[in-house]
Image: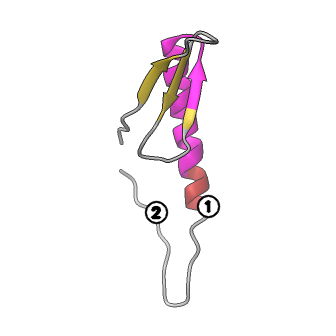
Amino acid sequence: MKFRVIIREDPEDGGYVVSCPAIPGCHSQGETLEEALDNIKDAISGCIEVLNERVTQRPGERLTDVAL
């Protein structure tokens, strides 16, 4: 699965700030562009994990995992 991210240079502290608009609140940063992109990958994975953990099952429903 691919996600589009927004990359901004941080004029105050240097480095880069990255956010993933598809997942509200999913942001990261890094001193280099490569580090920032690696960090946002970790942040996206972590956000998806948390979202999956929040899923609850109701009576009559069944949970399953789907891989993309």
| Place of residue 7 in the rendered image (x, y in percent of width and height, measured from the top left) | 44, 23
The amino acid type of the residue labelled 1 equals Glu
User: Residue at (41%, 29%) from the top-left corner?
Assistant: 6
Which part of the image, by quadrant, shows the N terminus? top left
Residue named by callout 1: 53
Q: Is residue 21 left or right of residue 49?
A: left
**Residue 58 x, y percent position in the rendering:** 55, 84
What residue range appears in magenta? 28-48
Q: Which is more toward the observer, 2 or 67?
A: 2
On the image, the x and y values in percent for residue 10 come to 55, 15
In the image, what residue occupies the spot 35% across and 50% down? 68
Mark 2 lies on residue? 65
Q: Is residue 58 above or below residue 18?
A: below
Q: Secondary structure at mark 1?
A: helix
Which color scheme is applied? secondary structure
In which quarter of the view is residue 31 placed? top right
Q: Quadrant of residue 50?
A: bottom right
Question: Within 10 Å of the Cα at label 2, are there few (<14), some (14-19), or many (20+) other Cα atoms?
Answer: few
Q: Position of residue 38 (x, y in %)?
A: 53, 24
Main secondary structure along the magenta-highlighted residues: helix
* Amino acid at dot 2: Asp
Mark 2 vs mark 1: in front: 1
Sequence-wise, the earlier of marks 2 and 1 is 1
